[in-house]
Amino acid sequence: MNHQRKYLSIVLFFFLGLYSLNSHTQSEVGFSEEKILIPEGTSLAGYLPRRVFRNFDSPYASYFKSSVGFSNLPRTKVIALKNHSQIILIATIDVIAIDPEMRKQAETLIQSKFKEKINLYLIATHTHSGPGGFSKFELWQHLAIDKFNNQIFDLFLNSIIDSSTQAISNLKKAKMSFQQIAIDDVTYNRRRSLFLNPKANLITFLDNDNKKIVSLFNFPIHGTVLGPKNLYLSGDLPNLLEVKLQKSFQHPFMFISGAAGDIGPKLDKYKYFELDSAGDFVLMETLVENIVGQVISKWNQTDSSELKTISHQTFKIDLPKANVNLSHCLEFVLPKKFQWISKLFFNVSMPPDLNKPMELSIMKWNNLHFYLIPGEPITEIGKLIESKSLENNLSNPILFTLANSYYGYILTQKEFQRGGYESCNSFYGSSYGENFLSGVYSSIQKFRSIQ
């Protein structure tokens, strides 16, 4: 009996020692970015007013106007985080939304190159002037993205693979600093709700020599200033913001939006749809200079600490059957005196591709907790998630939206009933927001129990 106890004690101390050794292993971080050489004449995704019946101008544009040039090429940016035997990739691409098939293929092909377990999280910057033609989902093709084009799809796919591979090859032991600042007077609630969130999350990774690897800038703002009259391919506000921040601080920046389903960029003139593209660019430059100026004055770049804890889990959320409320859609486009006509219409079922469980991912980096959401939640939804996270002792909740797929706008029942553009593009009925929140709350509790 004593021998058994002695044996068990030795085994126990062995595993405790092994756990202690692993738990103090410093994580590694790598970064890479790559421009995507999109062909001239590629259509621009994002605005229905750019829709044409037939486009004969370019082999890369069918349903939408083709671009007339480049403001800047779309890019892929990847942060690689290695912790023990796993590698997590946080990647952004300059598109309006993520095609889940592209993400899945990229992850599979990257995994084939490495022994470690690879998890790819792919996030859209949500430019409405990025290239179209990259998704096989026909509904999106006709409404915003244009006819699927294998060449465009492969350009993005290969860029994600190449940039991820490069980020992994750039891995080095790293530390992390975090600070939250308020960015004032640069956004407004376009649904005239009282909800607004000025918090920007700034996360910087540094090597052991305190050289900055990359900073992640997370802020709830709809990243679109350039209107439908703009025919230049562009990464829009997120791209210019990254460029200006990098120029000011002399290291790379990566933008990821927060809960901005009802948050627009606050411009000097709100009717920017009436401006020409040159006017749009002037407004965007002014707004970005305002944001960067506030970051310069408020960001202290606090002391860094070793990045020891990285964990993540994905949860499935069942949703109601997808449909579109034509009353809300017509109400949005009809003149006020004709809006009564919208009441004659009803819900229409959507393609079966939309009737799949939503996948929500939760990640932890030290004491930061991230919620990766495949859609556009409004501010009120975002604040409810933050509150529930704190109630469950998951500190520093940070929302990464437009991640891995796209399930439309996520509104509360009250906001959905108000109608408008966001309600028209919310495909799971008036109970969608409550159903989604219930799934998120359950996922938070499960994640907490796992931790």
Image (cartoon, grey):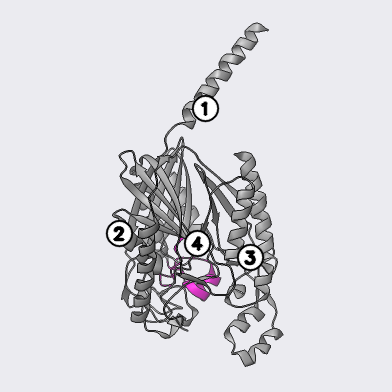
Residue drawn 54% across the image and 22% down it: 15
**Are the residues flagged by discs 2 and 3 in contact, CB closer than 8 Å?**
no
* Identity of the residue furthest to the top in this view: 2
Disc 1 residue type? Tyr
N-terminal label among 3 and 1: 1
- Labelled disc at residue 352: 3
Q: Nearer the viewer, mark 2 or mark 4?
A: 2
Give the mark nearest the N terminus, 1 or 4.
1
- Is 80 in front, or is 306? 306
Q: Report the mark closest to the observer, 1 or 4.
A: 1
Q: Earlier in the sequence, mark 2 or mark 4?
A: 4
Q: Position of residue 335 (x, y in %)?
A: 59, 90
- Give the Cα separation between the discs numbered 1 and 4: 39 Å
Q: Say what amino acid the circle numbered 2 marks.
A: Ser
| Range drawn in magenta | 124-149
Callouts 2 and 4 close, C-beta under 8 Å: no
The residue tagged 1 is: 19
Left or right, 4 with respect to 37, comes to right
In the image, residue 262 lies at what x, y percent? 55, 70
Q: Secondary structure at mark 2?
A: helix
Q: Are marks 4 and 3 in contact (CB under 8 Å)?
A: no
Left or right relative to 50: residue 250 = left
Magenta stretch contains residue 143: yes
Give the image quarter of residue 225: bottom left
Q: Residues within 10 Å of mark 1 (few under 14, many from 20)?
A: few
Residue ID at (61%, 80%): 329
What distance separates the C-alpha of mark 1 from that of mark 2? Answer: 42 Å
The residue tagged 2 is 248
Q: Which residue is mark 4?
A: 99
**Kind of residue sitting beneath label 4:** Asp
Marks 2/3: CA–CA distance: 47 Å
Element on which disc 1 rests: helix
